Image (cartoon, helix red, strand yellow):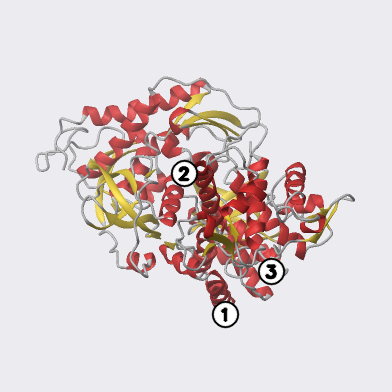
Amino acid sequence: MVSASRTERLLNLLIALLNTKYGLRRGELREKVYHDTTSSDVAFGRMFERDKGELRQFGFDVETVTDTGWGSDDPATTRYRIGKESNRLPDVSLSPEECTVLILAAQLWEHAALGSAAVDAVRKLQAAGGLVDAELPTGVQPRIRPAGQAFEDLVAAMHAQHPVRFSYLAGSTGQEQERLVEPWGLGSRFGQWYLVGQDRGRGDKRFFRLSRLTSAVTVLEKKGFTPPAAFNVRAELAALAELPVQSAVVDVEQGRLLGLRKRAQPVSEPAPEPGALDLESGARLPAAGRDRLTVPFRDAETLGEELASYGPRVTVISPPELAGAVRRRLTGAAAFAARPVPDVAFPEAGRAGRTRKRTSEDQLKRMLQLVPFLVHNQGLHISEVAARFGITRKALEDDLRILICSGLPEGYPDDLLDIQWDDDHVFITQDLDLTRPVRFTVDEACALLTGLETLNGLPEIAEGGALESVTLKLMAAAGEEGVKAAALSGPEVAPGNSATLETARTAIRSGAQLHLRYFSPQRDAVSDRDVDPLRLYSLDNTWYLEAYCHSAQGLRNFRLDRIEALEPNGRPAAATAKPADSFPVKLFTPNDDDTVVVVELAPRGTGLADDYYAERTAALPGGGMLAEIRFGSTGWLPMFVAQHGGMVRILQPDALANASREWLAAALAQYEASSDRPID
């Protein structure tokens, strides 16, 4: 629970420091704001310093004013105040076109690590009256894919300038080692997220792929570092060379894995009996019922994740590092599945979030957005205000009750915040100079500016000048925090097949029905569908078409890169088809006959609860999590477990848990049986 007294104290301290011209001494603050008469001078000093630190995190610089001729270490001669202009967000005036681009940029992060920061930044602009009504592009919404808990921990450490520790699988040696790193920047390149920073153990700058982290990230909060001046992670990653194309040799069940076969080539083999040794290479020929294929790839870990998901349907013959990547994932998944099963119990409230519990800092941050918002939006219905801030009416009323009890120390009634909502419409008549929102935090500046930079990959957004002009305005408003945004760089969002996207978008605009030929990797089959297209959205540069499928008689989401053919069928789309409530659209549409599956997530895999829209979660000792997830098709769940290599296991239903263990055992058996054979 949040301590209302602590929140009120922080708010009163802020108001007192904002509304003093000459500053207040520590003794005055102790008496009039803290009303503290029992703690020692040392204990009070520690509390006061903690509170000043929290205010600085909000963007309020607490100035220290020292009487002439006296030292700053004397509390009796040192006064404190907050300048009224240094901490405020400058006025930002945006055109409707600029607002459109800005909202798209903020919504990029909706379910990713900076989602809450983007929301806070937009609320500040709304509170300052800088946003106007804007129309978003028809049926198109890009998104940044959630990058997991490691990404969130690294962003926090990077902005707070704390070094981090993690275990890492080196691509050059294949060895797992612990690394101590100063996180200078995070960015996406070649479809992967990279950390760029100083490896303290090696005394040099290094690039770390987040997918190669094999442990949770530990933030060393008692240590610090200073990043290089003018560091730009996009420029650093631009110099990173793409890995060369290699060839993998794999044996695949005949008639299976159509998606893999589409990019593979058959290997011509001499014909003796299946499984015999090839005298030239020393490797065994494919067993009966198997085809030998060559598959091009650039990174063994990326292909290894895919091949591990195929379990016993594929065996890696070469190269050894790819076989090792697959075996490591299968071994990790099997070891996790064999661990003792925890008690399965969920709290009545449902989801147990991965983020920290709500604190006084969170509540005060909302209040500081709430006051200027009410000033610029007088008379809104209380339910609408609560909806704008994503809280319940009760939580909003709790906030308002704290606000109306806050004001100048020992002030008169006119020196208190005055907010009325008796008739369910909220009015504020006394704001105590909280009419303008506080400046952007570094997270908020990063969310907006990195989002705007990411939108540059969409030609239709980049054209017209609005993207450039709104970027310049926000850079000016963000100041120093905007410069720090260069430490974060987003992924490419341009679609791989622009023609397919344009066909779908044209059909959405004109209300035309589409016929598509679609490959489903879960079913390992190609099917023909007639669909009513509703909208397009992306996760990084993977684009999806949300549509009403007449074959399935329900909403479905189709990956554009798996659509083999797409064209209008000459019929209009049905007027009854409606899209889901909001972006991002779920990649899975729930139905009454879905299977409810309980999974356990390792600490590194807790982000999967969000990725798969868990309905209930429960924290486990050690940082893991239980999650209850609905799945429409369960046949692919063993693939799901194998792919994530020890980050997830199925607990219930028992039949699915057993099926996944059998799948993993069968997949590992073929490598154990071939471990004594030479690998080409």
Picture coordinates of residue 449 (x, y %)? 52, 67
Cα gap from disc 2 to disc 1, whole angstroms: 41 Å
- Out of 588 and 208, give the one closest to the viewer: 208
Is any part of residue 583 visible from this angle?
A: no
Q: Hey, which residue is sitting farthest front in the picture?
A: 69
Disc 3 secondary structure class: loop
In the displayed structure, would residue 123 be above or below residue 478?
above
Q: Residues within 10 Å of mark 2 (few under 14, many from 20)?
A: some
- Pick the residue in front: 525 or 63: 63
Few, some or many residues within 10 Å of mark 1 (<14, 14–19, 20+): few
Q: Earlier in the sequence, mark 2 or mark 3?
A: 3
Q: Crowding at label 3, few (<14), some or many (≥20) Cα neighbours within 10 Å?
A: many
* Residue type beneath disc 3: Leu
Disc 2: which residue:
521
* Residue that badge 3 annotates: 131
Q: Where's the C terminus, which quadrant?
A: top left
Query: In the picture shown, does residue 538 fall above or below 392?
Result: below
Q: Could you tell whether 196 is left or right of 538 in the image? A: left
Res 465 label: 1
From the top left corner, tell me how far across and down residue 562 is, in percent: 49, 53
Where residue 638 appears, x then y in whole percent? 44, 32
Q: Amino acid at mark 1?
A: Gly
